[in-house]
Amino acid sequence: MSGHSKWATIRRKKGALDAKRGKIFTRLIREITIAARQGGGDPDGNPRLRLAIDNAKAANMPADNIERAIKKATGELEGSQISELIYEGYGPGGVAILVEVATDNKNRTVAEIRHIFSRGNGNMGETGSVAWMFERKGIITVKRENKSEDEMMEIILDAGADDLSTEEEFFEVTTTLENFEHVRKTLIDKKLTVENASLHWTAKNLTSVKGEDAEKLIKLIEAIEESDDLQNVFTNADFIE
């Protein structure tokens, strides 16, 4: 099983701060809206919407917010058209970066992300410039509670997961796209606390970065995280102490 990257820990702590500021609610609402628009407003027949709703509930989002987002997506309530986009580029140390956004103004968002890359010692690239370095995986974050690593390993392997990373307060389970929903349901059925489950771009190979380049890269990623349109940011960085 592979080790846990420093950025994953940084990202999770950053996510906790975002939750306090309410940013996580905005991102979850966008995901619900996009999922409902693409696959319909019935979560029983729309796995992406079911996942988005479950994540929203795990973040303690009020039910009224969830229902309103679905109704806007299905046309029952008036709402703006939101598009999903992916931007690609390189950061300090030659690290590849993928940026997922959800926006109602593509021109505004691309200009903002390009400016952030430029200001942060990075370069925004063309479509496909770094995407080939990543593959789509399912990532499920589970509270450790009283489970040992060996116990959790046995559970996730039996469920068909690929990998397990361990932190002080949580486990991070990695799955293939095909097994993602089955693994998620298995963990829930076993009464484990699933904090979040989502599809991520995972690097096929890591690029080592340390010292000044690492500091600059973290600042660049934090600047990207501050974008109002951001949904997720992924890198192939391996932070060396």
Image: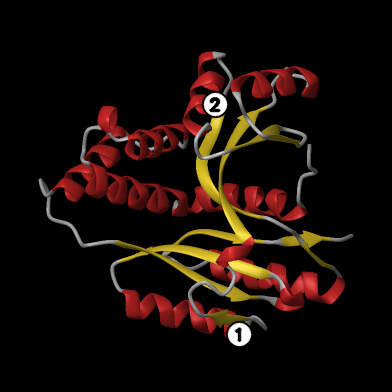
Q: Where is residue 60 in the image (x, y as percent from the top left)?
A: 43, 34
Instruction: Name the amino acid, label 1.
Output: Arg
**Residue at the image point whose x is 68% and y is 23% from the top:** 157
Task: Give the left or right position of residue 158, taking residue 205 as reference.
Answer: left
> Are there few (<14), some (14-19), or many (20+) residues within 10 Å of tag 1?
few
Q: Quadrant of the C terminus?
A: bottom right
Query: In the displayed structure, would residue 89 be above or below residue 160?
Result: below
Q: Label 2's element? A: helix
**Residue at the image point whose x is 85% and y is 68% from the top:** 210
Task: Give the left or right position of residue 20, taking residue 47 as reference.
Answer: right
- Per the rendering, the mark at residue 119 is 1
Q: Residue furthest top?
A: 190
Q: Which residue lies furthest to the right in this view?
A: 241
Q: Where is residue 110 in the image (x, y as percent from the top left)?
A: 42, 78
Which residue is tagged 2? 183
Query: In the displayed structure, would residue 155 be above or below residue 60?
Result: above
Q: Where is residue 173 in the image (x, y as percent from the top left)?
A: 64, 34
Instruction: Name the amino acid, label 2.
Output: Val
Q: Label 1's element? A: helix
Task: Give the left or right position of residue 204, taking residue 28 as reference.
Answer: right
